[in-house]
Image (cartoon, helix red, strand yellow):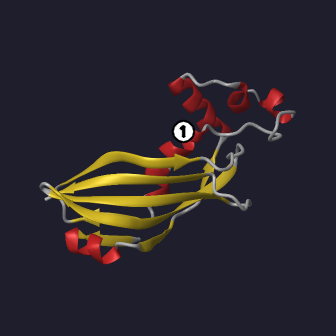
Amino acid sequence: MLVIEGLAGLREHEGRDLGVGDWITVSQEMIERFADLTGDDQWIHVDRERARVGPFGTTVAHGYLTLALVPKLTSTIYRVEGFPAAINYGLNRVRFPAPVPSEQRIRGSVRLDRVEPIEGGAQAEFTVTVAPERAAKPVCVAQYVNHYYQ
């Protein structure tokens, strides 16, 4: 795991790939729990029989579930230290180029795109690409923004 130390460390890694994380399996149980929490129980996510004859041949994860897994997917890649507070500021862009079939393994890779000063600290923009184990297209590409306060 890469440890980035403070503002100098963020600037040093600006424009660089930070690494690739560990695999996680997106289980049908995770998909169903997410459906219960969000109320998004569309058949393509939760009805195994109907999904079997649907466009993907199985149930698939919600795009927002894939996005919600980004902190877990990136937690084995890097961490930023040397700031008393780090805040998730939001997202600039999110795309879901391909579905995540139930029981598929996925992992993330991260690039630190830009570091800019803000009042009391720094804003860092990262791009995470979530890739499936056996497919050519990523399943999620998102640019997220964190604020680090000194």
Q: Position of residue 33 (x, y in %)?
A: 57, 31
Extreme residue in the right direction: 53
Q: Position of residue 111 (x, y in %)?
A: 44, 67
Q: Quadrant of residue 29?
A: top right
The residue that appears at 52% across and 26% down in the rendered structure is: 38
Pointer 1: what residue? 64
Q: What's under tag 1, amino acid-wise? A: Tyr
Quadrant of the image containing the N terminus: bottom left
Q: Position of residue 49 (x, y in %)?
A: 83, 28
Q: Quadrant of residue 53?
A: top right
- In depth, the one of 22 and 10 nearer the eye is 10
Is 62 left or right of 52, judged from the image as shown? left
- In depth, the one of 81 and 97 nearer the eye is 97
The residue that appears at 35% across and 53% down in the rendered structure is: 145
- Within 10 Å of disc 1 (Cα), the crowding (few <14, some 14-19, many 20+) is few
Whether residue 14 is situated above or below residue 91 in the rendered picture = below
Q: Position of residue 120 (x, y in %)?
A: 12, 56
The residue that appears at 46% across and 72% down in the rendered structure is: 17
Quadrant of the image containing the C terminus: bottom left
